[in-house]
Image (tube, rainbow, N blue to C red):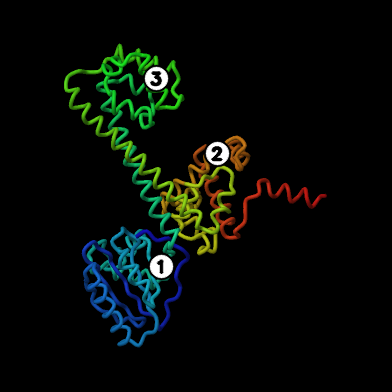
Amino acid sequence: MNSSKTKKVKIINEKTMIAALDIGKEAHFAYFRAPKGKDIKPFSFHNARKGFDTFWMRLCQFKREQGLEETVIGFESTGPYGEPLLHYLRKKPVTLVQINPVHSKRVKELTGNSPHKTDTKDPRVIADIISLGHALTLVVPEGPAAQLRRLTQARERAIRSRTAMSNQLQHLLFVIFPEFVQVFQDISTKTAIYLIQHHPTPESITAMGLESLTEVLRTISRGKVTHSRIKELFEAAQSSTGIDEGKESICMEVSHLASTIAYESCFIEKLEQQMDQSLDQIPYSHSILSIKGIGRITVAGLIGEVGDFTRFHTISEMMKLAGLDLFEVSSGKHRGKRRISKRGRSLMRKLLYFAAINVVKRNGILHEPYQQMLSRGMAPVKALIAIARKLLRIVFALARDNTVYVEDYVHKCHFKLAA
């Protein structure tokens, strides 16, 4: 389920009822437990409005019979199939929590001393974890933040799809015109896609003539493709080693892939425009954008992944959400290496990693700390992860305080005090 995690829940008391849900595509399994051990046998209900109403009716009945005042409903944070139920329950007087699937997998061994997994056992395991106080509250994105999350995820899917098609296209081009991918190493550019759509074979390029090819490519690329590169392509077409057998069918598929890539690129541009518009509606977005080296798309993606920076209270919560919290495996005299847990939102880590690459460049805000890490013998990738963690701290502080980033703040304050 696409919901952010915050601090652990410690609100279970003698008047609290626990309702655990095992989410499924067509049906969910529910289990109720009272503080004194009274419970009911897990039951299933359909993933539809009628099923939701049945679940809520049975929950209220159990709550009245046990004389309870509060209700905590928990579930695993897996997949999109629980989102309709989540939004249904958000309007009810309950506390919604979620648990880490890794926790349920381990606690499952304790229940019955067996790794056995069934739809009736899983909600009992979830209830056990909630009772132990290891559940996590939810931060569900609303308004522009919810829009940013959906747009960010759609953009990521579109980019993955475009990349896969580009790889397929490159393989096919190498069969009929291998020299093309040497001249245009990035075949997803506007100029390369135009050529593939209209002149995918060496014969069609040769038939145009050098002057005509130059005029077309200079127009399409707006002068970005140099004359020497155009000449290189034309000469490569004249001496191409591409095959002739089955070329017609390959050209048909090549044309289809090129058109689809062009369409995906337009779709990604539209998504980015929508992300840009939604970003302007987030009050603290200008604070994060004040960091030199972080663009609007990155900031939009981070806000979409987090949901709402202002709902988090400590940086440790934010680190866990991103999966950038550190752990080590040590025992006795053995001291393990510290690594990031990676138990968080993978897209958030990806955005922070690429943002870290930008801020460590020459004249970047974190160039000096990065160079200091490298001088101590730290591997470049580890140094970038450390910079990503540092960058997340900066972003969190700026969003929390709704202020702007001041480069070399400590040095400037020290100079001001000395004056």
Going from N to C along the chain, the mark reached first, 3 or 2, is 3
Going from N to C along the chain, the mark reached first, 2 or 1, is 1
Q: Are marks 3 and 1 in contact (CB under 8 Å)?
A: no
* Type of the residue with mark 3: Glu
- Judged by depth in the image, the label closer to the viewer, 3 or 1, is 3
Pick the front one: 413 or 6? 413
Seen in the image, is 226 located left or right of residue 372?
left
In three-dimensional space, the C-alpha distance between marks 2 and 1, rounded to whole angstroms, equals 36 Å
Going from N to C along the chain, the mark reached first, 3 or 1, is 1
Please count the marks in the image.
Answer: 3
In three-dimensional space, the C-alpha distance between marks 3 and 1, rounded to whole angstroms, equals 64 Å
65 shown above or below 183:
below
Within 10 angstroms of label 2, few (less than 14), some, or many (20 or more) residues? Answer: some
Seen in the image, is 15 located left or right of residue 243?
right
**Disc 2 marks which residue?**
378
* Type of the residue with mark 2: Met
Residue 23: x and y, percent? Answer: 28, 64
Tag 2, which secondary structure? Answer: loop
Q: Are marks 2 and 1 in contact (CB under 8 Å)?
A: no
**Disc 1 marks which residue?**
135
Residue at left offset 42%, top offset 70%: 133
- Judged by depth in the image, the label closer to the viewer, 3 or 2, is 3
Quadrant in which residue 213 is drawn: top left
Pick the front one: 113 or 229? 229
* Type of the residue with mark 1: Ala
Quadrant in which residue 92 is drawn: bottom left
Tag 3, which secondary structure? Answer: helix
**Disc 3 marks which residue?**
215
100 shown above or below 338:
below
Image quarter in which the N terminus is found? bottom left
Residue at left offset 36%, top offset 58%: 102
Which numbered marker is on residue 97?
A: none
